[in-house]
Image: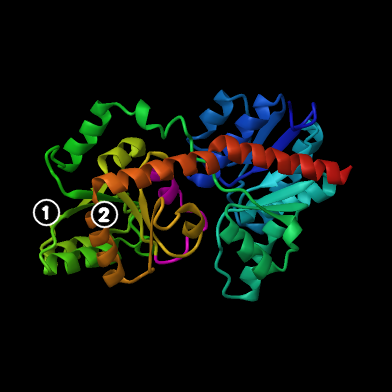
Amino acid sequence: MSILPDDFTLLQVTPELETGGAEQTTIDVAHGVIAQGGKALVATKGGRMAARLEADGGRLAQMPAQSKNPLIMLGNAARMIDLIRREKVSLVHARSRAPAFSALWAAHATKVPFVATYHGVYNARSNLKRWYNAVMTKGDLVIANSEYTRAHVIAEHGVPADRVVAIPRGVDLTRFEPGLVSAERVKTLRDAWGVQAEDRRLKVLLAGRLTRWKGQALVIEAMARLKAISDTRILLLLVGDDQGRKAYRAELEHMIAQAGLQDSVRLVGHCDDMPAAYLVADLAIAPSLEPEAFGRTAVEPQVMGKPVMAADHGAARETVVNGETGWLVKPGDPEAWAEALSNACESGAARRQVMGMAARSRARKLYSVDAMVEATLKVYARVLETKR
């Protein structure tokens, strides 16, 4: 049975459709609306994911939605007003701050309901920045991508609790399905990363772009502490692009060389096949120094049946059940991480497998794309009903 009215038309607004969690969610929700017989439009600059939107039956409304130039933002608002009227748009959903201003102005001008998704815990060191961030709270309802983000929105902006709904980001259960990943794909990555099939060490994978707050340097320091006490039971795989952060990459390489960890820590670069990557690993880690608003890299490996070790703050407290689906570790403390990694080795393969199975069962239930899309469509239905 359809959650939405028969003539429902959604306009989502996002800066670009290049890559990323917010962009993927935009595509997923558009697909869900179309599956229920509605129309899905996306106002955006465009990008490599636009072809997927159109393949699903969605439509692109190309405009410079990524711009923070006030004059261009006004122009975008005028374009959206025209689009809303021409396409008889039922609801506008903004997914980023700069285009949210244009979307909000257009929604007000056309008296169409407006919702926004608060995708991260944005820093606000000044009143001006707090005002800028608050545009995401000006609609009929606010969607937060975790309970952690929801609590932040309520505390930071004074939004009534009943106007903020937590909908966790969804993982594609078809893509992240261990049974669909061939042995050949896993072997291809093992060969590329120099991981021997007979290597009995605990393969620990940290997925994330090379940026300091993701915690790569912290875990290298933890590895150095383990080596100092002759504990060499771990192979650490750092998966991610430096995205031009050459100095940080060089710093990590220097740390590895200084500690003599060349055989124990590998910087393997960008990976296009993360489902296979998680099957190379025995354990995935998310040691972020700052709280994650959701943390996809703590959820995807659980869907693949791997236990996760994550920093004990932010949304990881929701996505990882300590001692059941993984471990939570004191943030930013290399000694605590060294001890936790050692304990993961001690727990043994059978215990880690049991945790991985519990992780997979829980994550599939809570963090599927279908669950995320259904919850989002229910928000749309609720807003439309309230407006009536």
Tell me which corner region of the image, top left, top right, bottom left or bottom right, holds residue 33.
top right
Numbered label attached to residue 332? none
Q: Position of residue 287 (x, y in %)?
A: 36, 61
* Residue under the point 39% across and 41% down: 357
10 Å crowding of disc 1: few (<14), some (14-19), many (20+): few
Relative to 258, say whether 58 is above or below: above
Q: Quadrant of the C terminus?
A: top right
* Residue under the point 22% across and 32% down: 188
Relative to 217, say whether 67 is above or below: above
* Residue under the point 45% across and 55% down: 321
Numbered label attached to residue 347? 2
The residue segment tinted magenta is 289-302
Q: Is residue 294 magenta?
A: yes
Which of discs 2 and 1 lies nearer the camera? The answer is: 2
The residue most toward the bottom is 126
Q: Position of residue 29 (x, y in %)?
A: 62, 36
